[in-house]
Amino acid sequence: MTVKEIRELSPLEIEKKIREIRQELLGLRLHKQTGQVEKTHELKSLRRDIARLETINREKKAAA
């Protein structure tokens, strides 16, 4: 997700997206442990997406 896309979301939508990405990250970690992940770069990408979402969510809460 890009920063522009995230900023267009409401705080509730951001929270929902964070939960979804964390679930996806958990699944990828489990698959990685069993050696079933081919695209290991997705782990790093998902962690960065979560960080972006949380940062923008905090900014929105502070501004409100």
Image (cartoon, rainbow, N blue to C red):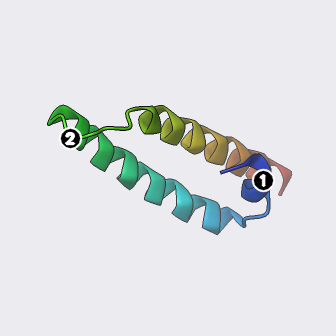
> 45 or 53: which is nearer to us?
45
Quarter of the image that includes the C terminus: bottom right
Can you identify the residue that label 2 sits on?
A: 36
Q: Nearer the viewer, mark 1 or mark 2?
A: 2
Can you identify the residue that label 1 sits on?
A: 60
Q: Are marks 1 and 2 in contact (CB under 8 Å)?
A: no
Element type at mark 2: loop
In the image, residue 61 sits, relative to residue 47, either above or below, namely: below
Which residue appears farthest toward the front when viewing the image? 38
Asked if residue 16 lies left or right of residue 23, the reply is: right
> 64 or 45: which is nearer to us?
45
Residue plotted at (63% across, 67% down): 12
Quarter of the view holding residue 8: bottom right
> Residue 6, percent across and down?
72, 55
> Residue 9, percent across and down?
73, 65
Asked if residue 23 lies left or right of residue 45, the reply is: left
Residue plotted at (65% across, 51% down): 1
> 10 Å neighbourhood of mark 1: few (<14), some, or many (≥20)?
few
Asked if residue 62 lies left or right of residue 32, the reply is: right
